Structure formats: structure tokens, C-alpha cells
Amino acid sequence: MIRPRRDEDLPACAAALRGVHESDGYPVHWPADPGRWLTPKTMLGAWVAVAGPAVLGHVALTESGDAIAQAVGIAAPELALVSRLFVAVDARRGGVARDLLDCAARAASDSGLQAVLEVHAIAAGAIALYERAGWRYVGSGEGAWTAADGLPAKVRFYIGPS
């Protein structure tokens, strides 16, 4: 089941995120305050996939910045950026990531916004998910964060299906 994230979900989300970070290196740099990282100031909404009390995954929508707006050719106020998408390591391969991605894209559309995302160019599994889900690659650039090597991350920009 996917539902809107609640404040009381944040500890379980942070625990799942810790496992993802240790397994996959996402996020590249572990945040000092995972709850704050999961709740960026520009957040438009957040959802969790749950099975009973267990949080299986998370996704958020945020306002978009100018870099991705330029990459997709749509003004930033018309966009919603899919962000903070992850699935707990022990909950993978069951379609949770695809369901969360679809949920975020629907929420953007329901708000009259176009869903977009950026992904680290080395994240082959995530890229494959987005492309299988019908997201369209529209360009590459530098991310707003540094990669493990200390250089700006190379990212790929995608626009969601209509």
C-alpha cells in the first residue's frame, strides 16, 4: 500500500535509507539529519510504501530548479521533481519502486505539473527502471551535489510519461 508519508514514518524511512546508503551509496553522502534530508524545504508531498507497520520505500515531489527546467524545456513553476526515491534493500524486486514512481507522477499530474527527475549517471539500475516505466531521457548535465570523487555529479534528466 502507498500512502502519504506521516511524521511518525520518518524514523523507519531513515532506517531504510541507511540500508540503501550502505548497500548502494544513495545518497552519496550520509546526511547529518536524515529526517530533514527526507523533508526538503521545497517539498510538495511525500509518500511511503508500507506493508503493515514496515516502511518499504519512499518518494517525494519537490519544486524544480532552473537547471532541470532548462534541460526539459519547461518553466520550473510547471514542474514537479521526483526526489528521495528509494526502496528498502529487503523489499526490492517486488515493484515497489515502480509503484512509488507512478504515485509521484500521478500526484504531479493531478496538481497540473509535469513530473521530471534527475539521476546520477552511474545509477544503472535506476536508469533502467525509469526507462522501462516510460520516462524519456532529455539530456545530461551536472547535479547540485558532489559525487564520491568530490566532483559535481554527472546526471541524466528525464521527463515523465504524459
Image (cartoon, rainbow, N blue to C red):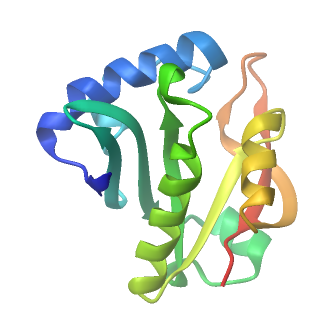
Residue 50, by quadrant, is top left
Residue 140 position (above or below residue 29):
below
Q: Residue at x 62, y 34 (%)?
A: 93
Give the residue at x 53% y 21%. Answer: 89
Percent x, y of residue 154? 82, 40
Residue 160, compared with residue 73, is above or below; it is above
Residue 96 location in percent, x, y? 51, 45
Number of numbered discs: 0
Vertically, is 94 above or below 23? Answer: below
**Could one spot residue 41 in this view of the protein?**
no
Front residue (pair 122, 134)? 134
Q: Which quadrant does the C terminus fall into? A: bottom right
Q: Quadrant of residue 124?
A: top right
The picture places residue 71, in percent across and down from the top left corner, at: 78, 69
Residue at 48% x, 14% y is: 19
Q: Return the residue found at the far bottom.
A: 112
Q: Is residue 51 visible?
A: yes
Task: Identify which residue is drawn at 52% across, 70% down.
Answer: 105
Question: Would residue 61 appear left or right of 35 to someone viewing this image?
Answer: right
Frontmost residue, 161 versus 158: 161
Given the current orientation, which residue lies at the most extreme left position?
A: 8
